[in-house]
Image: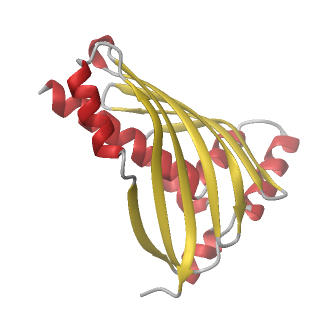
Amino acid sequence: MRKTLILTAAVAVLALGACGKQGGDEAAAAGGNGGDAASAANKAAEMAFRFQPGQYRTTIEVQKMTMPGLPAAAQEQMKGMFAKGMTSEYCIKPEDAAKGVEEMKNQMAKGDCQFEKFEASGGTVKSVFTCKNQGMEMHSSSEGTYTDTGSQVAIVADMSMPGGKGMHIEQTVKTERIGECK
């Protein structure tokens, strides 16, 4: 049971990392609570961070993962699972590309995420957000670069889980357009 919870938490961090990097829309949602200047800045960030339609590949590579209190053998097993990186491919249809970060905001909302910061301009993106799910909470910050055909973002996340357990993870998420949709 304990191993299942830890594995679930690790996968959740990786999945949320991919979401946070992929569209950046979730971050734009968080900034919408401020005044007109903040709202205008978020709208500009949403317009700046849009991918072209096409087939994309996202690769998540974990540089560092620590889980205090977890036996060393279990930590090594977890590190081994993520050492090769995780890769997925998907299609961004023209109608989805037109939504920009809106679709990402919708996906992040399902994970009960709130953005404290989202900035995207001149090919750079930065965000700070917190996600809560099933008694777990993850605080994450990201910084990276983007074009209309991909992005590369470094993400640092700290997760707290029921029972006082925690995890720290540092990962890089790279998304690249690899052609037309299959």
Viewer-side residue, 39 vs 159: 159
Residue at coordinates 41% horizontally, 71% vertically from top-left?
Answer: 89
User: Up-down: is 49 above or below 149?
Assistant: above
- Place of residue 107 in the rendered image (x, y in percent of width and height, measured from the top left): 47, 54
Placement of the N terminus among the 4 image quadrants: top left
Viewer-side residue, 23 vs 6: 6
User: Up-down: is 84 above or below 133?
Assistant: below
Placement of the C terminus among the 4 image quadrants: bottom left
Residue at coordinates 59% horizontally, 80% vertically from top-left?
Answer: 53
Q: From this viewpoint, is residue 109 visible?
A: no
Residue at coordinates 83% horizontally, 37% vertically from top-left?
Answer: 35
- Place of residue 167 in the rendered image (x, y in percent of width and height, measured from the top left): 39, 24
The colour scheme of the drawn protein is secondary structure
Horizontal side of residue 150 vs 104, given as left or right: right
Horizontal side of residue 28 vs 138, given as left or right: right
- Place of residue 2 in the rendered image (x, y in percent of width and height, measured from the top left): 16, 24
User: Up-down: is 13 above or below 152?
Assistant: above
- Place of residue 56 in the rendered image (x, y in percent of width and height, measured from the top left): 51, 73
Q: Residue furthest left?
A: 1
Q: How many marks on residues?
A: 0
Residue 104 in which image quadrant: bottom right
Viewer-side residue, 156 vs 83: 83
Residue at coordinates 36% horizontally, 41% vertically from top-left?
Answer: 12
